[in-house]
Image: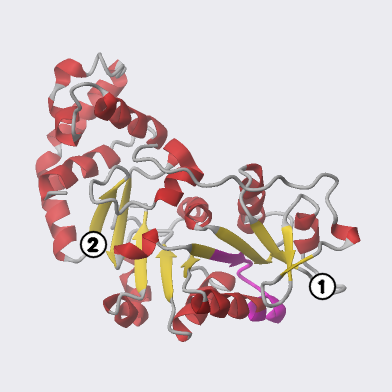
Amino acid sequence: MNTQELVYWYALNNITKVNTKRKNSIYIAAYKREPRLNIIELFENEDLWPELALTEAERKAFVTAKKSLSNYSFEVEKLLNEGIDLIPFHDPDDRYPQILKINLGRLTPTLLFTKGEASLLKQHMIAIVGSRDANNIALQFTQNVAARAVAEDKVVVSGFAKGIDRCALDAALYHKGRSVIVLPQGIATAATSLRAYYQQILEGKLLILSTYNPNDRWAVGRAMGRNKFVYGLANQIYVAQTQNSGGTWEGATEGLKAKRPIYVRLPEPQEAVANGELMKLGTRAVDLNGNEVPVPPEFQPVAQAEEAPQMKQGSLL
């Protein structure tokens, strides 16, 4: 994809008055019409906006975005020069992760910002998730599952938070494996905390990914928003430790609703965690090494969760 097209994708991504689902739908409508419109024509051919059912407010938002194209061009050039790639959800080079589209549908991010080896997004990925203040058993489980993932040539997805997330990342890299970091902020504002991982980025072992503009700073809302992309990228999700509320619990329960495969570490007797409660909702149980085991009677759900659906292929959402 050429730089000019990326500038227009950057403009579309920066239209804040139109939500992600609607922006993606507008582009898909433009692309599916005959003749097809590319991203540049979507912005420049205003006569076709009524055909695409743009509301008056949406037309104004597009016009406003067009006025910033010169600034956006400068910003995109700067990002590319700094080694930050932009991957739109309809990427002709097929770099965008298909699994994210499958798991999130039209809520998939319009644009991804990445630094590192983008081909990692096409590999089989697992996520190991859990509490920031994880206990030693949960941390050992995380190390075991990460090591096993590396041995099976799988990529470990990390949300880069303290506790389980960081443990999963470091364990994967320690065992000479590969990982994807999903940031809760822009790539540029995370530069200091990422400095220790630059060698792995250069070696193609690590990809940094953000759905936020590079200069966006950390915020609670962005940290919570980041979680669904960690879950969305994973073919399997392993829960090391959870309480019955918070990001890990919410992500796992949302995954169950979407019939995703969720594997939960079997808790030790008297262990003060809600892993067993999560199993009662229909997750699968695994031992300390990530091997699936029968769910104990006390954690059996009333109705077993259905098998996760097979992934479907497709070029658009």
Point out residue 298 in the picture as x, y percentages from the top left corner. Answer: 90, 59
- Identity of the amino acid at label 1? Glu
Image marks 2 and 1: residues in contact by CB distance under 8 Å: no
Q: Quick check: 51 left or right of 287?
A: left
Q: Which quadrant holds the C terminus? A: top left
Q: Is residue 17 visible?
A: no
Residue shown at the point (19%, 17%) measured from the top left? 48
Number of residues whose C-alpha sits closer than 10 Å to that of mark 1, classed few (under 14), some (14–19) or many (20 or more) = few
Residue shown at the point (19%, 35%) measured from the top left? 39
Q: Nearer the viewer, residue 255 or 304?
A: 304
Circle 2 residue = 84
Asked if residue 171 lies in the magenta stretch, the reply is: no
Q: Is residue 297 visible?
A: yes
Circle 1 residue = 271
- Identity of the amino acid at label 2? Ile
Q: Quick check: 252 left or right of 302?
A: left
Q: Nearer the viewer, residue 79 or 179?
A: 179
Residue shown at the point (64%, 50%) measured from the top left? 250
Asked if residue 135 lies in the magenta stretch, the reply is: yes
